[in-house]
Image: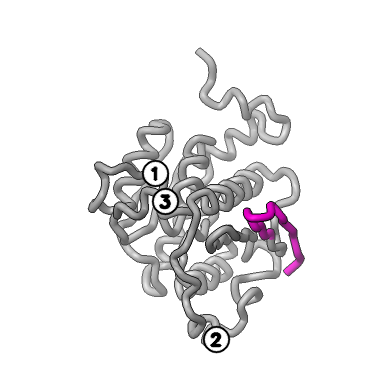
Amino acid sequence: MESRYARQLILPEIGIEGQRRLAEARVMIVGAGGLGSPVAAYLAGAGVGTIGIVDDDVVSVSNLQRQVLYDEGMVGRAKALCAKERLSALNSGIIVNAYNERLTSCNAARLIGCYDIVVDCTDNFAVRYVISDTCHAQCKPMVYGAVCAFEGQVSVLCKGHATYRTLYPDEGAIQAMPHSGKEIVGVTPAVVGSVQAAQVVQLICSYGEPLIDRLWSIDLRTMWSFVVNI
């Protein structure tokens, strides 16, 4: 029978050693929404051995336009538990831990301490600072992602010199900013979340040039993208 991972095992950047690293990796995804859905699905598909999902929200009908982990039968149920159910069905050979709670300054050290890499799939400025500060303190990479309408950005923070505070040093000012709104086309988080997942695989398997201390941005209206140093 053909191996589940046959198509990536033939890549020299991954191979048997890379697949072993993926199987041994522990990745936490904070936020199981538009970004968290593709990140979780692709990491589970790639064979990341342990995936943690942190989210205290429930599935709503308006989520289904972009949060592809869920279906109509899951409306009203906890996202973290539904995500675990879906990922376990996708790959029974991995461990999925569901945390039906919000990441806060009180539980961040405990939760993040159990994982090697943290993927920021939130839409909350305050939580991003908590993730960044905790990852920085624990010397763990944070794969940051953000979306709005047709635009998105990704960076690998807390691995080199840059943290979320490098991007936004004034926490008070950023917290006071008006929310960018809820307008979003479903493919935007799909594209950005896929790039986040790609960064995680790169970090685990140690190939290519991850976005460490660099910020990638894209506008899907024009397909114009660029990378800048942070």
Q: How many marks?
A: 3
The answer to whether residue 178 is above or below residue 33 is below
Instruction: Name the kind of residue labelled 2 in the image.
Output: Ala
Left or right side of 155 for 147: left
Q: Which residue is under mark 1?
A: 69
Q: Which residue is under mark 3?
A: 52
What residue sits 53% from the left and 73% below the top? 133
Point out the tag, 2 or 1, that comes first from the N-terminus. Answer: 1
Outermost residue toward the top?
A: 1
Place of residue 203 in the rendered image (x, y in percent of width and height, measured from the top left): 64, 49
User: Considering depth in this image, is 212 or 86 the residue closer to the camera?
Assistant: 86
Point out the tag, 3 or 2, that comes first from the N-terminus. Answer: 3
Place of residue 84 in the rendered image (x, y in percent of width and height, measured from the top left): 34, 44
| 3D distance between C-alphas at marks 1 and 3 | 15 Å
| 3D distance between C-alphas at marks 2 and 1 | 34 Å
Place of residue 43 in the rendered image (x, y in percent of width and height, measured from the top left): 51, 42
Q: Is residue 176 visible from the viewing direction of this image?
A: yes
Left or right side of 37 for 170: right
Left or right side of 90 for 136: right
Q: Which residue is under mark 2?
A: 173
Start-end of magenta stretch: 216-230
Badge nearest the viewer, 3 or 2: 2
What residue sits 68% from the left and 54% below the top? 222
Q: Is residue 130 visible from the viewing direction of this image?
A: no
Q: Is residue 229 magenta?
A: yes
Instruction: Name the kind of residue labelled 3 in the image.
Output: Gly
Point out the tag, 1 or 3, that comes first from the N-terminus. Answer: 3
| 3D distance between C-alphas at marks 3 and 2 | 31 Å
User: Considering depth in this image, is 143 or 216 the residue closer to the camera?
Assistant: 216
- Looking at the rendered image, the quarter that the C terminus falls into is bottom right
